[in-house]
Image (spheres, grey):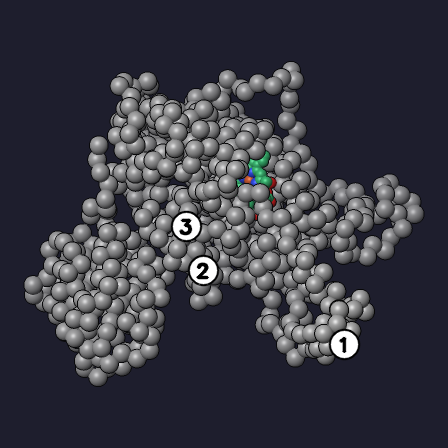
Amino acid sequence: MSDRAEPHDAKDSQLEHSRVDDTDAHLTTQQGIKVDHTDDSLSAGGRGPTLMDDFHFREKLTHFDHERIPERVVHARGAGAYGTFQAYDASLSDYTVAPFLTDPSVKTPVFVRFSTVAGSRGSADTVRDVRGFATKFYTEQGNYDLVGNNFPVFFIQDGIKFPDFVHAVKPEPHNEIPQAASAHDTLWDFVSLQPETLHAIMWLMSDRAIPRSYRMMQGFGVHTFRLVNAEGRGTFVKFHWTPLLGTHSLVWDEAQKIAGADADFNRRDLWEAIAAGNGPEWELGVQLVSENEEFEFEFDLLDATKVIPEEVVPVRPVGRMVLNRNPENFFAETEQVAFHTANVVPGIDFTNDPLLQARNFSYLDTQLIRLGGPNFAQIPVNRPVAPVHNNQRDGYGQQRIHRNRAAYSESTVGGGCPAIADSEVFKHYTEKIEGHKIRQRSESFQDHYSQATLFWNSMTDPEKAHIVDAFRFELGKVGDMDIRQRAVEQINNVDHSLAREVAAGIGVVPPSQETRPNHGQSSPALSQLREPVERIDTRQVAILAADGVDGGGVTKLRRDLSQRGASVEVLGLADGGIRSADGVEVKADRAMSTVASVLYDAVVVPCGPDSVAALKSNGHARHFVSEAFKHGKPVAAFGKGIDLLRVCEVFGQLADSGAVALDRGVVTTTAMGNELPDEFVDRFAQQVAKHRSWDRDTGHIAA
Ligand code: HDD
């Protein structure tokens, strides 16, 4: 047992029984026998063979040989954290009996695991992919898992196609290339033949597929689920997570470079934010549809390739989740956590969405192979805080010592226990079903394009440019020109101008006419950029400095930005102390050569003639600034620092006096030291909160 402070909640307190701390302990075997030597095996004479007697050697090696488990077939790469969820009020009481959604006095412990989908466990975080957003609510009524993604739609409509889709997107089987990427022939072959993928493909080509941070992405339950109230009345529901920090993305060139500079970028970001006390928060929202409105939409509520536009059914806020505790052991917690869409609690039920129905089979099945047997729910991270009593017995890894003789129901031997409860039980929604047993997709699932077009129409110009560039990149990596051509013909069903733009970049024949007129409708809520949340807190700002820097200016800037919640680092040409021009102590937090501009949200070049001269003649420094500029990031300079911007081809209006100039996210002033105006910091902070300036040339070539 560890000597941690008071447990945070019921789950934390339960986990405390499983924690092990080796501080002040002696090395032992698994049997608790102390050993005095673990570096040499027991052998016959100094140079003779190793002896069977060496139980310590055999145990140590055997455990090592068995310490890997199969990685998740999808979502292998992930990062997790604990936290709590709390409802705002009782307003959902008319719809559900689940107290964690309706009782504002209940704080429900949660564990969330974020993930990419296609890559292996060791793949890079910033690949173009969907992100998993799986939440386990340890409610007092048992575990509820909301196993969602950061896209509100999925690639297929029926789970029987899941193996086909996953085989198409995973690395190709002959050479296992490419890792964690969708830019290859098999995926686009599949897409070109399966129009139902098109809507999710639009999301995959959009900025949503390269989130800046797990803390800055939305989450969606995707399916239409059902809430059930005390009278047994059902209401259709879609779940939404909205990050309080806003939804923000990387740019593609940056994402690729981060994959090299810091493959753990999103994982590290989550970990460091929580460790620093900046636990990320999301608001849970619901879209509710009454049962008698089921057929009032142009699409089928059971079709997971469709959104209910928020302008049609608004998202209603329900409660807030904060993630505030990092796991203590990655394998024990983040790797062994087992989510399952069928983990529901009274008040939440399924619908007949065929994708959800398949998932309700697949998750339990996959845990059996991944976690080695039917007792995985007893692994600490998976255990409910609600009491567990049943007649399930034995199996690999049974941890519990069941004392009652009767492991069957009904019994008299065990006094009839565990007894059947008569309140707070899970009651399946009594839906009336009629029909023939047929293997056929419903007619109501046949429109694959309208919402893909809706998504396209809803994007702002920069978002559209990014989508065109993404299609060109992805299809440009496809070797088979017939696949490229077929993919463009599919895109033509989404929007003719989009298809022509994509075609122009990948050397295929642009479609000569439109196959479906664009319906012209849009849903502004689908755009990330129309109403962005602008916050500076936890943004990473780099200040580039060398000997001779304006220490007073750097100190003021660092202090003022930190007060606003930004994380500020001084990057020197080497680690350690920097001799400032004014004697004010400045210390480099890191050497520039160990990081890259892609790891920061914004960059500042302070004054100091010698400092700027040194930076000008340094390749890292020049590249740092010009790359940040290219990626649309806020760039600032004061005093002589402006000279470095000029060398780095940071174009636009740069200050020629103490007055602050702002042009497309570039903030400058010739003032320095104590003269540095507050307005300079204010303006720069606003740009950092804004995240990017999309009005710069980022390399997009219009067709
Ligand atoms: Fe799935 C893992 C999300 C469709 C089968 N899925 C998995 C995870 C997430 C999702 C977030 C990772 C959970 C974790 O962190 O451990 N999956 C989704 C969403 C889907 C979806 C939002 C569509 C709406 N999945 C889906 C289908 C099937 C699966 C249609 C199979 C029929 N998913 C699995 C799986 C995984 C999984 C094979 C791999 C590891 C695991 O479950 O525990 O069973």
Q: Which residue is mark 2?
A: 268
Query: At label 1, which amino acid type do we have?
Result: Gly
Q: Nearer the viewer, residue 641 or 121?
A: 121
Q: Nearer the viewer, residue 61 or 238?
A: 61
| 10 Å crowding of disc 3: few (<14), some (14-19), many (20+) | many
User: Label 3, label 2: how many angstroms apart (C-alpha)?
Assistant: 12 Å
Residue 606 picture location, percent across and down: 20, 69
**Are the residues at dot 3 and dot 2 in contact (C-beta closer than 8 Å)?**
no
Name the residue: 22% across, 79% down: 580
Judged by depth in the image, the label closer to the viewer, 1 or 3, is 1
Judged by depth in the image, the label closer to the viewer, 2 or 1, is 1
| 10 Å crowding of disc 1: few (<14), some (14-19), many (20+) | few
Instruction: Say if 614 sits above or below 240 in the image.
Output: below
Q: Which mark is residue 264?
A: none
User: Label 2, label 1: how many angstroms apart (C-alpha)?
Assistant: 49 Å
Q: Is residue 341 visible?
A: yes
Q: Secondary structure at mark 1?
A: loop
Query: At label 3, which amino acid type do we have?
Result: Thr
Residue 460 picture location, percent across and down: 27, 38
Residue 468 picture location, percent across and down: 30, 35
Q: Which mark is residue 126?
A: 3
Q: Which residue is mark 1?
A: 45
